[in-house]
Amino acid sequence: MGCVLLKEKCLNLEKYLKHDNLLDLDGLDLFSELNILREIIGLENDKPNDILNYIKKINSFLNAYIAYRIILTISLLVD
């Protein structure tokens, strides 16, 4: 996914999760975190569950952690 599209999707997720002035995650921070994770992890760990476990292990990337938990929860509900 290109950077412009990824940034747009991150900002859209922030908008959808926003309630009044309360944010569950910051879209620009999520965009930055996903770019950093892409550099750190590379393509060998591309499964969402593996990425979530890595994020939990290093105890960082709070916005990405929230986003991956949402992705995995939705996929379980849809299946």
Image: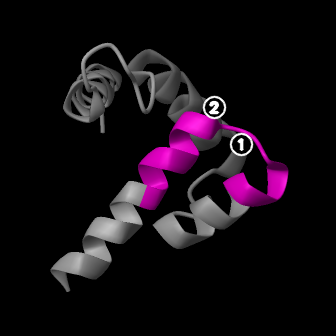
The label on residue 64 is none
The local crowd at label 2, few if under 14, some if 14 to 19, many if 20 or more residues have their Cα within 10 Å, is: few
Residue found at x 71% / y 42%: 40
Quadrant in which the N terminus is drawn: top left
Q: Is residue 51 left or right of residue 70?
A: right
Relative depth, front residue between 6 and 75 = 75
Report if the CB atoms under discs 2 and 1 are less than 8 Å apart: yes
Kind of residue indicated by mark 1: Ile
- Spatial CA distance of label 2 from label 1 is 6 Å
Q: Is residue 49 left or right of residue 40?
A: left
Q: Residue furthest front?
A: 20
Residue found at x 32% / y 22%: 7
> What percent of the width, then of the height, locates residue 58?
82, 50
Q: Secondary structure at mark 2?
A: helix
**Residue under pointer 2:** 36
The verdict on residue 68 being magenta is yes
> What percent of the width, then of the height, locates residue 28?
44, 16
Quadrant in which the C terminus is drawn: bottom left
The label on residue 40 is 1
Residue found at x 79% / y 47%: 59
25 lies above or below 41: above
Q: Secondary structure at mark 1?
A: helix
Relative depth, front residue between 34 and 65 = 65
36 lies above or below 79: above
Please provide the residue range marked out in magenta.
Answer: 55-69
Q: Residue furthest bottom?
A: 79
Residue found at x 22% / y 24%: 15
